[in-house]
Image: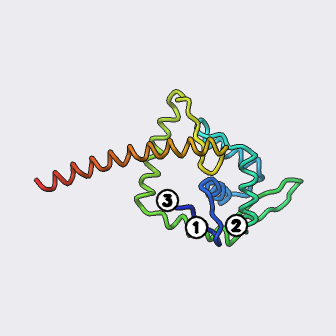
Amino acid sequence: MFGRLPLYKGNRISPSQMVMMVLLMHKPMYGYEVVKDLREKYEGIWVPQTGSVYPALRKLQDHGILSVENLDGKDYYHLSEEGLRWLKEELARLPTGALYMMRTLELMGDVLSNMPHRGEEFVPPDMGTPEDQLRHLRDLKEKMINNLRMIDASIAELEKELKE
């Protein structure tokens, strides 16, 4: 899941679609309920738009990952049996180090979300206008380069320590 987009029967599944699938693991939801849940979970960071979420849900349905049932005039999405099995297998592939990092980022995110707004809004790489996506990816690249520099410096320090 990290470093590559997961594939389901040759179809790429975006990080945003993976999040939607995880939400639907818990209970079936109608489309706007998915939007509201995403907005709540990403409050202050990302504002999911119906114009992006509904097409993503339809793609998952087209792939056979989601099934839809109309109840009281609303289409409720839920994971198909095969979709649930695939999602669990994909999540089980996450290495322990990635789980540690996610928990660390979650803890830091809790602190950051309570700090004054920094004027940034996250745009997932699979959503937003092409200009937003490009700007976002360039920003991510710069931050990753800086993180790699810090990692290289830490490695050099540890190697020096071990040689002494």
Q: Amino acid at mark 2?
A: Ile
Q: Nearer the viewer, residue 83 or 122?
A: 122
- 3 vs 2, front mark: 3
C-alpha separation, residue under disc 3 versus residue under disc 2: 20 Å
Q: In the rendered view, does 92 fall on the left or right side of 31?
A: left
- Asked if disc 1 and disc 2 are in contact, CB closer than 8 Å, the reply is no
Q: Is residue 138 left or right of residue 101?
A: right
Q: In x, y percent, where is residue 160?
A: 16, 51
Q: Residue at x 47, y 46 (%)?
A: 141
Residue 81 picture location, percent across and down: 69, 71
Name which of mark 3 and mark 2 comes first in the sequence: 3
For mark 1, does the 10 Å Cα neighbourhood hold few (<14), some (14 to 19), or many (20 or more) residues? few
At x 13% / y 56%, what residue is drawn?
163
The nearer-to-camera label among 1 and 3 is: 3
Q: Residue at x 65, y 48 (%)?
A: 127
Q: How is the image coloured?
A: rainbow
Circle 2 packing at 10 Å, graded few (<14), some (14-19), many (20+), is: many
Q: Which residue is mark 2?
A: 65
The residue carrying mark 3 is 2
Q: Which disc, if any, is residue 88?
A: 1
Q: Amino acid at mark 1?
A: Lys
Q: Sequence order check: which comes first, mark 1 or mark 3?
A: 3
Q: Which residue in the rendered view is the most extreme toward the top?
A: 116
Mark 1 to mark 2 CA distance (whole Å): 12 Å
Total number of numbered discs in the rendering: 3
Residue 88 occupies quadrant: bottom right
